[in-house]
Amino acid sequence: MSFSWAKPYQPKHPFMRWLDERLPLPRVAYGAVGGGYPVPRNLNYWWNFGVLAGIFLTIQIVTGITLAMWYYATGDGAFNSVEHIMRDVDAGWLLRYAHANGASFFFVVTYIHIFRGLYYGSYKPPRELVWMLGLVIYLLMMATAFMGYVLPWGQMSYWGAQVITGFFSAFPLVGEPIRIWLLGGYAPDQAALTRFFSLHYLLPFVIAAVVILHIWALHIPGSGNPTGVDVKDEKDTIPFHPFYTAKDGWFAAAFVLLYAIVVYFAPNWLQHPDNYIPANPLATPAHIVPEWYFWPFYAILRAFTTDFVLPAKLWGVLAMFTSILLLFFLPWLDKSPVRSGSYRPVFKRFFWLLVVDVLVLGWAGGQPATPLPVAIGQIAAAYYFAHFLIILPLVSKYETPLPLPRSITASVLHGEEQESAPAGVKSGKKSTVAG
Amino acid sequence: MVRIIGFLIGLAFAGVLLISLFIGVAQYVSNPPAPLPEQFYHKEPKALHLASDGPFGHFDKRQLQRGFQVYKEVCSACHSMHLVHFRDLKALGYSDAEVKAIASQWQLEVPDINPDTGEPATRKATPPDAFPSPYPNEVAARAANNNALPPDLSLMTKAREGGAAYVYSILTGFQPQPADLVKKFPAAKTPPNLHYNPYFANLNIAMPPPLTSEGQVQFADGTKPTVDQMAKDVAAFLVWTAEPNLERRHAAGISVVVFLLFGTILGYLAYQNIWAEAKRKVRVTGPLEPENKAKRQSAKRKAGIKGGSKAKP
């Protein structure tokens, strides 16, 4: 699709030729993830996480469809049907643990994928739409994960649903009616459970559709690379297959190994014990916390404790939504022409500060709402907004980037033995030689 | 334009957060929250080691049978276990006949209807039945227990932080309330009908000490029934009721890990093999100036790589 030297699909087998003339699906696959897609030769391992996200989406859909064959979306039956799956359905425990932990791993790889994009400037022209479609996928993932967590109808499921739908009641006038309309009642109940199940089944397929758009949009300019330098000629690229299929293949096996260790040996490590207690609208858990992948946002929500002009709750909800939506504007907030953080000394420091900041936010969001975690969460949340909305635009204006390598091939040559580590990753000095 | 609006929004959020922080700190300093007794007296669960711990963990069937006996003779008086069926007991090493006998001799009968009249009735339990609950409903359970609800025990070790160690600590943790606690927090004196237990979140638990004396249960296998032993055994039993497929999971997990490890190694070797060609391509097509060659040699020497035979064109 992208480069003139991309190898065209040449079916050898008569059947494939026959098929290609009628339905050129193999041709599409060849151009998208086969030998017909030229990819920069210098991708490092941070570029493996997109494929991994696709693998985990597939795992979630397969295990989820199977679980749905046994699950009852009723207030009386949901909890017990999950336990029936765990106890009496053949390999039901495996399906359910694989699905519950698969969600966590899907978020792990997606977060790494997003932060890779932040560091290497993957949101910059000409890939703005790739970035924005990725954020749409992320938002859909959040909705899907939240609704999926409600389905076992344990205590955290129920109270999580209560808290999250309660966000809408923060908006004046229209908020409460919207909340009741969304839930189909005054509190989460049968109506909410059934519609959450319906949407939880639907959204993954919407995600899959947006993933296709995400990849389509990516293949127009082609993949970025750790130097951020554009592909100049054929020497800079290698075909996706067999080179990156081989690299993705072994790395995916290693990552699935990690996943298997959690599924088989610590399946409840990331689960909250309260969700093994059936939902009880009359007993509020001591600390309501969402799943770990929402902790940073939960910390931002709880960080607003003062009714300053607007009620604190409304501030919290607005800030939480803004914290994700602002990422859509990143291509216009960060105007630096240099893509890769490796050649941006000031940006790089702030980037790592942001990583630490989000980890601190995550910690604060997972703690009970006692004064210390809330105070730390407030500082971390303030930095989060300052980072994207104040620091990044200023850095991109005043920073002097390091000289870029002449080309991808030049950077690879100076990386000597490490074919996947371009000169710029470790220090900017080597790249000066190249450039 | 985007940057100006963004700048203002960022300033607003960061500003309100800093105001919130400032007010929060001021409030904390001027009016610190009163300390709670559980901050000082609550204890983390005691260490408990069971055969089911760890990645190679398996069930000690004799211990599970003892634990089942404790549940049957002590806990089941108040606590239901509605997710466990008599048929499941075969996993503890009981034969079909023994399971049948346990079901039919269970102290409670199963609700049913009279086959002739359709009137509500009860009948003896059979292996496919779940353990019958001691109370017909929550109201009855609360009425019999000073308005406290004895929780169902099927999932107890997964539904509490600390798991089996928590159960064991609660069962062995009953003690008189420390005198200095009452001195420091007069309002926190354990009320009547509650029982002091430092392993319980708010220190006072409604459950009276269930295991009180040695020999409360006579173990069929001759193990000395100390309170500690009974508590350990019933905690082990509750690990099984919460996760009956644990052994199967561990066994499958080891095969899967070995398989994936093998796959990862093969995949890595394939990757190395395929990429060797790509590396060579860079060398051939790239500028082979003497400067670069010398650099490569010195880098190799430094890294301790001998011939670099793989990269030879």
Image (cartoon, coloured by chain):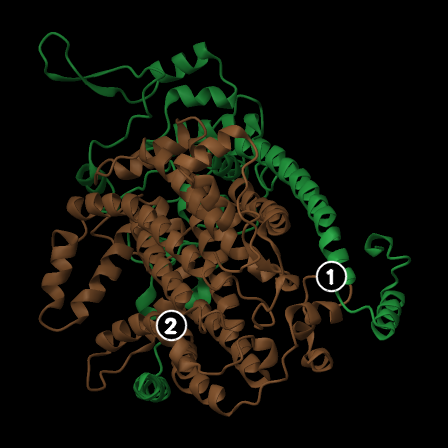
Chain colours: A brown, B green
Which chain is home to disc 2?
A
Q: Which residue is mark 2?
A: A327
Is A201 drawn above or below residue B32 in the view shown? above
Q: Residue furthest top?
A: B116
Q: Amino acid at mark 2?
A: Leu
Residue B199 appears in the rendering: yes
Q: Crowdedness of circle 1 by 10 Å Cα count: few (<14), some, many (20+)?
A: some
Q: Are marks 2 and 1 on the same chain?
A: no
**Disc 2 and disc 1: Cα gap in Å?**
37 Å
Q: Residue furthest bottom?
A: A398
Is B42 drawn above or below residue B49 in the view shown? below
Q: Which residue is mark 1?
A: B282
Depth check: A257 or A265 in front?
A257
Residue B258 figure quarter: top right
Residue A184 at x, y = what percent?
12, 51
Local secondary structure at mark 2: helix
